[in-house]
Image: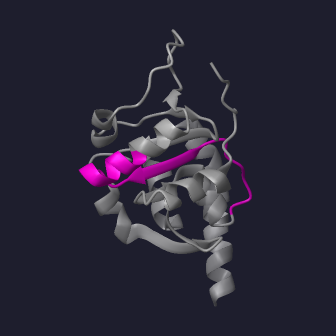
Amino acid sequence: MRRHPSAADLPALLAKLCDAGVEFIVVGGAAAVIHGAPMTTNDLDIVHRRTPENVARLLALVLQLDATMRYDAANRGLRPTAEMLAGRGQINLSTSLGPLDPLCELGEGQGYEELLPHAESVIDEGRQLHVLDLPTLIAVKTKAGRAKDRIVLPILIATLQERDKAKR
């Protein structure tokens, strides 16, 4: 079995998702990085549209990228399924391009359709990306309340303040 890299190749993963026609919103640390926050991330978190067609495109892509479930203690090489990607849970995958986490929802009522109005359109290497806006990302991380989220909140708030100051 091929070992997967421990850090995501964010540009390559984003390009593959876009080129495969997957509808998604970048969330989490990658969204913060795209917004210019001075931080790093090891994975790509996305919230994808859960229509049958989009799930099929996402599944085909992750299988092409040799995706397996990342937290499989028995190391059985479990593959994602359409049912998982169409559900409500968060899926942590290892791929040939690094960790990719398709999140069906960030929380109750926070799926693709609900988050899309809170996403900014960004052009990255000629590809249009939807990236969760900073105020919503800050709210999501505040609500999650995990230690790793509390640590990055001051960085996200400062990034938002600097961006707002630059707009004036």
Rendering quarter of residue 15: bottom right
Query: Is residue 13 something that shows in the picture?
Result: yes
**In the image, residue 92 above or below residue 163:** above
Residue 82, given in percent of the width and then of the height, sits at 31, 37
Q: Which residues are magenta?
A: 37-58
Q: Tell me which residue sits at (71%, 49%) in the image.
A: 40
Q: Tell me which residue sits at (38%, 50%) in the image.
A: 57
Q: Is residue 115 left or right of residue 95?
A: left
List the single residue furthest toward the top.
74
Q: Quadrant of the C terminus?
A: bottom right
Q: Is residue 167 left or right of residue 87?
A: right
Q: Is residue 56 magenta?
A: yes
Residue 161, given in percent of the width and then of the height, sits at 63, 73
Q: Is residue 83 left or right of residue 161?
A: left
158 and 26: which is toward the camera: 26
Q: Tell me which residue sits at (29%, 62%) in the image.
A: 113
